[in-house]
Amino acid sequence: MRILVTNCNTTERMTKEIEAGARAAASPGTEIVAMTPAWGPESAEGWLDSFLSAAAVLDLLRGIDENSFDAVVLAGFGEHGREGARELLRIPVVDITEAAAHLACLLGRRYGVVTTLDRTSGMIEDSLHTAGVLPNCVGVVGTGLGVLELGDEQRTASALVTAARRLRDRGAEVVVLGCAGMTGMDRRISTELGVPVVDGVAAAVRLAETLAGLSLRTSQIGSYAPPLPKTRRWHR
């Protein structure tokens, strides 16, 4: 099985971190191919960045050989673009936001999301609403750290524990890591707080494997029908 994992920003260091997390979660025999958009923001932290990121990722995906992959994982938490990607491709497209929330709902009645900056909370809530899992969410709490600051593991872990504790106090029974740059921190936070913690990249990879293993493909009827034939001018 071969899964394409796309970073939502142009920072190669983060792509490598996401790739490592995806490979750690993947089943034996699953090949992970990580790609970085050729253009767009160096980190996605707001509506403008998110829309630019979505266009850049779609630009990347339109250039792949779909027959070379069994599924795609979009590694941008709360970012736009997943619906467009599902129109563009027939193979399963799994978004880490949606995947993590669905798994969280299987582990507890209420969950909460820890993310980077508070300014991204609205986008994440909208994404969860579209996925149909917002009613189970007690809230989205920022750590005060920007995406590019997550490389300091000790500082990140401390901020995540503080934010996750606030969510637990609100009634969250499960915590979701709300940024692909937080991948690999789940067990550390879970041990500290005594609650299940879901890593979005790991969740999405495993769900992608399941869909591909069951030979399930994106429906071509209705919402995700192929794009209408017309001239489309891309950035180049």
Image: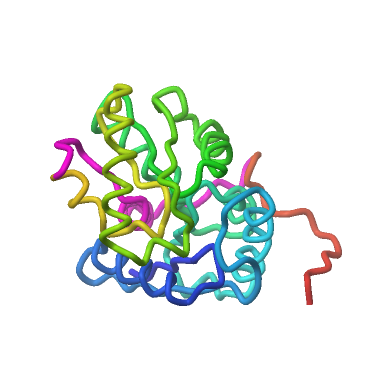
Image side of residue 64 versus residue 139, left or right: right
Image side of residue 109 versus residue 63, left or right: left
Q: Quadrant of the N terminus?
A: bottom left
Residue 194 is covered by the magenta coloring: yes
Residue situated in front as seen by the camera: 24 or 30: 24
Using the rendered view, name the quadrant where residue 175 is placed.
top left
Rendered location of residue 14, percent (x, y): 43, 70
Residue sitting at x 36%, y 70%: 17
Using the rendered view, name the quadrant where residue 4 is placed.
bottom left
Rendered location of residue 5, percent (x, y): 44, 66
Rendered location of residue 205, percent (x, y): 34, 58
Q: Is residue 64 visible?
A: yes
Residue situated in front as seen by the camera: 193 or 220: 193
Q: Is residue 209 visible?
A: no
Rendered location of residue 89, percent (x, y): 58, 60
Residue 209 is covered by the magenta coloring: yes
Residue sitting at x 24%, y 33%: 107
Image side of residue 36 versus residue 105, left or right: right
Q: Which residues are magenta?
A: 192-221
User: How many numbered discs, if any?
Assistant: 0
Residue sitting at x 24%, y 51%: 186
Image side of residue 162 versus residue 49, left or right: left
Up the image or down, 128 lies above or below 14; here it is: above
Q: Quadrant of the C terminus?
A: bottom right
Residue situated in front as seen by the camera: 90 or 199: 199
User: Which residue is most to the right?
Assistant: 231
Up the image or down, 120 lies above or below 63; here it is: above
